Amino acid sequence: MGDSPDSAAITVEGLWKIFGPRAHEVLDGDDRHLDPVALREKTGCTAAVRDVSFAVRPGEVFVVMGLSGSGKSTLVRCLTRLVEPSAGTITIGGEDVRAASPARLREIRRHRVSMVFQHFGLLPHRRVIDNVAYGLEIQGAARAERHARAAEILSLVGLDGHADAYPDQLSGGMQQRVGLARALAVDPQVMLLDEPFSALDPLIRRDMQAEVVRLHREVGKTMVFITHDLSEALKLGERIAIMRAGAIVQVGTAEELVGAPADDYVADFVRDVPRANVLTLRWICRDPEPGEPLDGPELPAGTRVADAVGVASASSRPIKVVAGGELAGVVDRVDLLAFLAGQDTPARAKA
Amino acid sequence: MSSTAVSAAAGLRLPRWAVPAGAAVVIAAAYVVFRGTATLPHDDEAPQFLAVTELREWIDDHRNDNPLFLYFLNYIRLFVGALYTFFQGVLHALGWPGITGVMGALAWLAGGRRIALVAVAGVSTFGVLGLWESSVDTLALVGVAVLLSLAIGIPVGVWAGLSARVRRAVTPVLDVMQIMPTFAYLAPLALFFHIGAPAGAIATMIYAIPPAIRITALAVSEVSPTAVEASVSLGATRRQTLVKVYLPLARSTMALAVNQTIMMALSMVVIANLISAPGLGGDIIRGLSRAQVGIMLPAGVAVVVMAVVLDRMTMALVDRDPHARLRRLDLVAAGVPAAAGVALIPVLPQVWPESLTIDMVAEVNAAVAWAETNWYAVTTFVKDATSYALLNPLESLLTSAPWWLVALTVLLVAWRVSGLRRALTALACLLAIALLGVWEHTMQTMTTVAVAVLVALVIGLALGVAAARSPRFSAVQRPLLDAAQTMPAFVYLLPALALFGTTRFTAIFASVVYAVPPVVRLVEDGIRAVPAPVVEAAVSAGSTPGQLLWKVQLPMARPAILLAANQGIVMTLAMVVIGGLVGAGALGYDVVSGFSQRTDFGMGFVAGVATVLLGVMLDRITQGADRRPSPRKRKVT
């Protein structure tokens, strides 16, 4: 990616988390390379996170995606040691999290990293405003100050007028807005979102995803977003890490995952993704053949295939694909149709 | 193919009942052969008893020069005693106008106008019954015991709720504290803390602390882990998370802990009168021991009223809307009766005016006498039928069998039901009982318990099943069960005594009435807890209601039913021992006479210990039943 680890918001290297009575024996021996089922049978331990490394750039939305049980929730809890990692290094904003003393760790949790939970984790005995102000309260902020800040954040997440309600009087979507507001109120550098919308209805979920996109644009926090929903991952993630059985199988942009899956597992995952909506012209352009006319319309290489269809139908000339002011290749109607057909073949056969 | 193989294998194997049946036959044969040998008859002058009596003499002589007493136990006694004197002093200074006003105010704050009315009416009842002084003493004693129980129970409970390790360490201790029949630890306490209010308060605490700890631990451990995680993820310290998350979220369940602690304390302070604790218990114990319902009825009513008032007040806290805040209006409204009461202290007499009391001893005694004569035929028939059909044969069986045969039977039964480890504990308890020299009385008590449990289970199962199948029946029955469980234990002796006089049967009747409510509730809840989809599946397959009950609901409610049996046994034993006051004889009587006669102290003490051992033994025999996989499951593997 070209970034040195120093400029990254979060760097994780060689992270392991093994649950069980003899975690450290497993870690030091060769058993750690066993697959999860064999490991459990042999030692009674569960390897939830296996040798995970990645770096998150400042301001990036980094999505960790995997099926349930793949270790993604454990991974995100290891980042601030809500779950104590078994091995590996974690650096947040240049600070070694694993070496931090309990007091220092609390400082990191109070000011640098905040978290949003799948089941909200709101405090039912407190009003919305006091829930949002909770992080500031435990930092020792005065009541007036923290309420002012909380009110500000509440209007940012669109909860004006609900400050005095109790969480159980709000809908699920609104409760999670409170959860988001609570995490934002402490003005962290990094937000960890652990399947924040999985417990919500599909329609609400879509609204909330849009909300996260908007918030990210407005406040520009670095986000680590955990999900088991591929379309959510593709929608939100600048880069996506796919986890399987505790290990990261592939990290890349949506385009990279769909266009060049690292193995059958990833390929299987992304099989049903409408490729034309994800892949760009970069993936299908070819060198112009001799004698091919080069006076057709020009499109940047980052244009999604689906968006090129309209241009192609307006002109019979091959489309010139340009990247950085230079010709990267051409795409004509046949190429487009072939690409679209490749994905639509089964449907057409049925019809 | 495979089915023939299975049936062939089954044909070779003995049927499942063969081993237990064979063992039963062998034991029966052994009984016939060895009957009357190796029995352990009771001896009032057994050396074990005399040794304990002497120990008490020694302790009484050295209470003020032995360091253990001088520097430790006496200080506890003095502290608790001072606290009691303080409470009592405050309450007496308030006088009846002050107490009425303050209780009304507290009740208003807890639950509003209606609860306040209940409290004022309840407090006035004490005066009307002519029991003002002793009611106030009881209130003071309950206050001390509850305060100290909560002061110990809540921190320990919170700790146990936070740490699974602490919970594991505390649970067995609480188990033993709860199995112990209340009667049993009075004598040892008298030994260490002398008699009187402090010893009574400490005895009450032993009884009242376990629910305080258990419910608090439950409340804390049930706090949503996500809320806790959210708090930690924002950088809260352990203390901040405890104060701002755990305690507020556990609050309403912890109010239930307070409620239970008060209820337990109230039922124990009465029994504590046996070691000269002051209060209403005096009238009740006196009435019981003289078989005079007229003496104990007013005191019994006063205790029940006190229980209802305190229960309503604390339950109002439990049920309160979690978001409600105290309104200023409520504060003012509550302030009025408190201020009025306190202001009236100098004006009105301290003691409830004599002219406002109702004396009904003579009338009640007359009514009881009337019932005794007119229902004689019915009550005597019930009593005699039970005695000749169940009690006498079982008792002569147990007392004439050699001790080793009884021990062997207990071992085998416990082994079969609860596994080897629990069986060995049960056996150890039984052998200890034999060594203590109270074998014969223990066998007699066991007979009474067995019969009472049997009756309680039959009634409890029937009512529980009926309630589970008919919502209407359940709706009628629930408030009755609630009321029954609010009442202190010995209250059940009252109607029993009125109907059956002082006999063994009185204790059985009282313990059945005492044990049935929890049994009914456990059975009903167990059957209701059967998942709806399972019931639906059975019904859609065409089961009749009967088939549904026998083939689905009862088998699936098995753990709850076994738990009900276990609870029934523990409760029955406690009651049968208290029944010693009203003619149940055996261990209970030994305990009672140990308190009343100095020379019998040793026997009473030993009988108390034997009661505990008997309780642990019966508990161990039945306890494992719900935890062991069913026999069929084991055969598969």
Image (cartoon, rainbow, N blue to C red):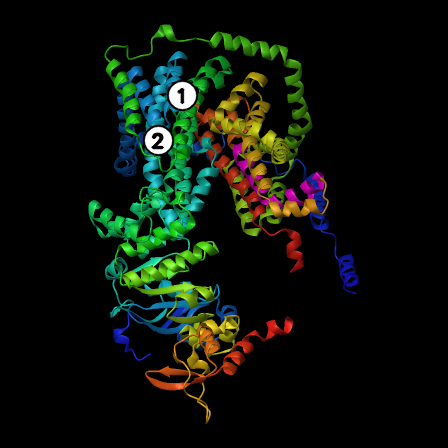
Q: Quadrant of the N terminus of chain B?
A: bottom right
Range of residues picked out in magenta: B545-573
Q: Is B454 part of what is drawn in magenta?
A: no
Left-right relation of B312 to B423: left
Q: Chain of mark 1?
A: B
Q: Position of residue A182 (x, y in %)?
A: 31, 53
Q: Position of residue A10 (x, y in %)?
A: 30, 69
Q: CA distance from mark 2 to mark 1?
A: 23 Å
SS of the residue under disc 2: helix
Q: Amino acid at mark 1?
A: Val
Q: Name the residue furthest bottom.
A: A290
Q: State whether discs 2 and 1 lie on one chain.
A: yes
The disc placed on residue A90 is none
Q: Residue at x 64, y 14 (%)?
A: B376
SS of the residue under disc 1: helix
Q: Using the rendered image of the protein, determine whether residue B597 is visible from the camera's viewpoint.
A: no
Q: Using the rendered image of the protein, determine whether residue B369 is visible from the camera's viewpoint.
A: yes
Q: Amino acid at mark 2?
A: Ala
Q: In the image shown, does B42 or B586 lie closer to the viewer?
A: B586
Q: Which residue is mark 2?
A: B145
Q: Which residue is mark 1?
A: B118
Q: Residue at x 59, y 24 (%)?
A: B505
Q: Chain of mark 2?
A: B
Name the mark nearer the viewer: 2 or 1: 1
- Secondary structure of the magenta portion, mostly? helix
Left-right relation of B554 to B233: right
The local crowd at label 2, few if under 14, some if 14 to 19, many if 20 or more residues have their Cα within 10 Å, is many
